[in-house]
Image (spheres, rainbow, N blue to C red):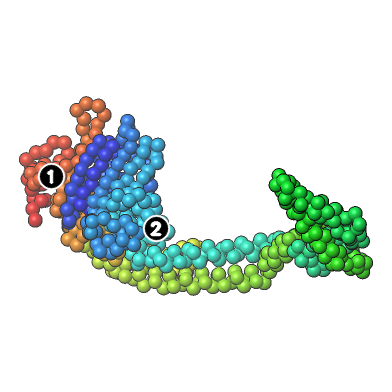
């Protein structure tokens, strides 16, 4: 439940701190005093959309902090998301800059607004002041039933199945519409692939052929050059290597006389060794040279075939293997795209999956509709509508992301009258009471720690208002309830009473909030009963309302 709320620079509130307790808490005040600002601030704390208009005029930013006492389940959720704080305690903080940007924090950890909303739904539920008007809309009636039934996961599964089905249908439609164009591209690709694949060309083959062709074409010149070079180094009478050795032999005895000639001798001996090794390399190379005109012809013809195909398809010969791979990959993509029969099977399977999940949701809704109708019928009997009964129909209709159901709420005015569409016969006061009964029933089905009602009692007065007050108090016995109200009969039933007022000593008017003691409650209830002029009679009436 909500323990503490702190506001700074929100709309007309410069700064306010409120401590809340369990039970039924009521907020009252004159029209325009700013009661709904507190609920807007609470909504901001649990992840509602941030708006720059929430920032008080002249302030740099607005800030709201809320402390909650939480259940073990919420504690576990925080632990799973690595957002734990003190056990059993949750701190939420939201900051809105003057330019509309916002930041959210859970137990001091920065979090995205979406995650804050997911957490906020587990600790607090706000029922807006116009919630009962949504009872006239079919989609809102469906949402209320799903909320009561706890259908969130099933509703999401149906929505996902719908998207997959629609995507499969769109892909199938595109394939059918583009069939001719795709087929033309496939034919072109198939021809190119046939030409290139017929070469059976290895990845590095072109480079290897160029090297081999060059070597075979110049084999005679290479052989003659190797042999003559080897002879010039070692074999001829005037061979370079022989001459170097002679010079070395001439210098050796002279080095014994003068060691200054030793470096020259060393270089000559090294040169003699190098020329001998070079001659050996050339001889071995000459032995490997193959004068093979047949192989040269084969290489020339292979290179000619590759070059001809490359020129025909306007590409470099060395790129043929990579181009062939790319063309084959593209053809595979087009084969999938043009596989209308396969796409039809996929679309049918997606449709059947959607229908399966939608019918499961339909069955769940039918069961929940009976339970919700009974719960609301019992509740409205205690709200001055004895004999009235609610009926909820769940009928198959056109499919959509919400499922295959059309859900309508019907009301019967008394035991013998047939139920008729709620939107056709219910008055504003009846809608308000039915909406409140649905909110209470949904709260029992999907309990959160704190329930907030923003003038959910609008459109009623007198005895019915007193009944609503008693219902709120009873609800407050099992969980924390916060309610903004204009009705003294409702306010008088609260366990705790807060007054919201607007005033100013200097500067623009500001909103303030204070908790009321017993004597102050009498004055506030008297004001709600009698307006500006508070008399002893209205005070006496206020005491009567506050009596247990």
Image x and y of residue 405, in percent: 45, 66
What residue is shown at x 24% (from left), y 54% (from top)?
68
What residue is shown at x 51% (from left), y 64% (from top)?
162
Q: Is residue 410 left or right of residue 226?
A: left
Image x and y of residue 443, in percent: 28, 62
What residue is shown at x 51% (from left), y 69% (from top)?
354
Q: Is residue 170 left or right of residue 389?
A: right
Q: Nearer the viewer, residue 332 or 27?
A: 332
The residue singled out by tag 2 in the image is 140
Rendering quarter of residue 510: top left
Q: Secondary structure at mark 2?
A: helix
The residue singled out by tag 1 in the image is 516
As displayed, is residue 529 above or below residue 370?
Answer: above
Task: Give the number of the disc on residue 480.
Answer: none
Q: Secondary structure at mark 1?
A: loop
Residue most extreme to the front: 257
Residues packed near mark 1 inside 10 Å, few (<14), some (14 to 19) or many (20 plus) = some
């Amino acid at each position: 439940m909500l323990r503490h709320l702190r506001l700074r620079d929100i709309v007309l509130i410069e700064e306010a701190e409120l401590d809340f307790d369990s039970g039924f808490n009521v907020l009252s005040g004159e029209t325009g005093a700013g009661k709904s600002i507190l609920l807007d601030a609470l909504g901001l704390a649990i992840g509602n959309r941030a708006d720059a208009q929430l920032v008080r005029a002249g302030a740099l930013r607005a800030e709201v902090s809320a402390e909650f006492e939480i259940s073990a389940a919420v504690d576990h959720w925080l632990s799973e998301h690595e957002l734990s704080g003190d056990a059993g305690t949750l701190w939420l903080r939201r900051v809105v800059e003057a330019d509309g940007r916002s930041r959210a924090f859970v137990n001091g950890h920065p979090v995205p607004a979406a995650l804050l909303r997911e957490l906020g739904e587990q600790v607090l539920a706000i029922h807006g002041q116009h919630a009962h008007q949504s009872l006239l809309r079919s989609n809102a009636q469906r949402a209320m039933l799903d909320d009561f039934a706890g259908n969130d996961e099933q509703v999401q599964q149906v929505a996902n199945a719908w998207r997959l089905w629609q995507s499969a249908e769109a892909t199938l439609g595109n394939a059918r519409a583009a069939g001719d164009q795709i087929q033309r591209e496939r034919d072109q690709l198939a021809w190119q692939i046939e030409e290139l694949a017929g070469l059976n060309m290895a990845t590095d083959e072109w480079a290897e052929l160029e090297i081999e062709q060059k070597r075979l074409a110049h084999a005679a010149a290479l052989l003659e050059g190797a042999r003559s070079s080897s002879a010039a180094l070692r074999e001829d009478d005037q061979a370079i290597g022989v001459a170097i050795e002679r010079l070395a032999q001439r210098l050796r005895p002279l080095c014994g006389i003068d060691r200054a000639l030793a470096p020259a001798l060393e270089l000559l001996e090294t040169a003699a060794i190098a020329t001998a090794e070079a001659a050996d390399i050339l001889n071995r190379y000459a032995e490997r040279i193959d004068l093979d005109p047949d192989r040269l012809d084969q290489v020339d013809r292979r290179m000619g075939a590759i070059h001809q195909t490359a020129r025909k398809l306007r590409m470099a010969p060395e790129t043929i293997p990579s181009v062939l791979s790319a063309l084959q990959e593209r053809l595979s993509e087009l084969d999938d795209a043009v596989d209308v029969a396969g796409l039809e099977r996929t679309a049918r399977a997606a449709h059947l999956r959607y229908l399966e999940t939608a019918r499961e949701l339909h069955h769940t809704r039918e069961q929940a509709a009976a339970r919700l109708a009974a719960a609301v019928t019992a509740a409205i009997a205690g709200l001055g509508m004895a004999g009235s009964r609610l009926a909820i129909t769940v009928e198959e209709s056109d499919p959509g992301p919400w499922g295959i159901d059309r859900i309508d709420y019907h009301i019967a005015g008394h035991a013998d009258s047939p139920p008729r569409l709620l939107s056709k016969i219910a008055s504003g006061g009846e809608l308000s009471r039915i909406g409140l009964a649905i909110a209470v029933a949904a709260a029992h089905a999907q309990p959160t720690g704190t329930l907030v009602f923003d003038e959910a009692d609008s459109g009623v007065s007198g005895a019915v208002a007193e009944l609503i007050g008693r219902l709120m108090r009873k609800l407050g016995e099992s969980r924390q309830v916060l309610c903004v109200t204009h009705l003294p009969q409702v306010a008088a039933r609260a366990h705790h009473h807060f007054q919201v007022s607007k005033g100013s000593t200097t500067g623009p008017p500001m909103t303030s909030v204070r908790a009321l003691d017993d004597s102050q409650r009498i004055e506030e209830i008297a004001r709600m009963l009698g307006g500006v002029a508070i008399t002893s009679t209205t005070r006496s009436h206020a005491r009567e309302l506050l009596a247990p």
